[in-house]
Image (cartoon, helix red, strand yellow):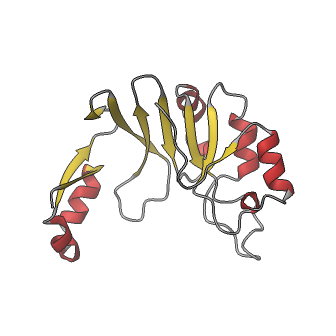
Amino acid sequence: EGLRVFAASDLNNLLLATPLWSPLLERLQLTPLIPGQALDLAEGLQITAVPVPHRDEWGVGTAAFVIQGPNRRLLYLPDIDNWDDWPNAAKILASVDVALVDASFYSADELGGRPPAAHPLVPDTIERFARLPTQLALTHINHTNPILDEDSAAWTAVLASGVQIAYTGQQFFL
């Protein structure tokens, strides 16, 4: 009861307009996140939604989140179509201490002949951002991605680049 849920205004409106969600929404406190506007979560902890390019079947947009703690900033960006469509990517990644970014696929041939959904490939992400003064960690990893296999060349290449592979339960102190 009363669980505070944060979402973009357009997503909140879509949920409120969809009767299927009514029983759940009665128990939640929807709080709009306005892109670019910091929202206090607790003392010394803020979150800011940052719009990112992504297919938009529902017309509600996709956001990354910058989380500001007392000492450090973290970017959580688990889903993006590609880096070329986001000209501010390097600037935003360089502005945080830690960036958890989309690593769905390592190569375009991972799905047995089917083209992967629109996501940047891990080697491209590393090439673009590994030299930034930001701790880069890969997340949103598809089960076909070889970086999940500690015996793979892909896993070795990622770690050799100085990039981390995020894992369940990992903590980042802000």
Q: Quadrant of residue 137?
A: top right
Picture residue at 36% right of the left edge, 36% below the top: 48
In the picture provided, is 36 more to the left or to the right than 22?
A: right
Comparing 157 with 114, the one in front is 157
Q: Position of residue 105 (x, y in %)?
A: 69, 60
* Residue 149 figure quarter: bottom right
Q: To which quarter of the image does residue 127 belong?
A: top right
- Is residue 87 in view from this perspective? no
Q: How many marks?
A: 0
146 and 120: which is toward the camera: 146
Q: x, y percentage for residue 128? A: 71, 37
Q: Is residue 118 above or below residue 132?
A: below
Percent x, y of residue 85: 57, 44
Task: State left or right for residue 166 relative to residue 174.
Answer: right
Q: Quadrant of the N terminus?
A: bottom left
**Residue drawn at point x = 52 percent, y = 28 percent:** 96
Q: Is residue 79 visible?
A: yes
Residue with the most extreme right position: 153
- Whole-percent x and y of residue 150? 79, 58
**Residue pictured at 70% horizontal, 53% vertical:** 121
Above or below, 138 against 98 in this view is below
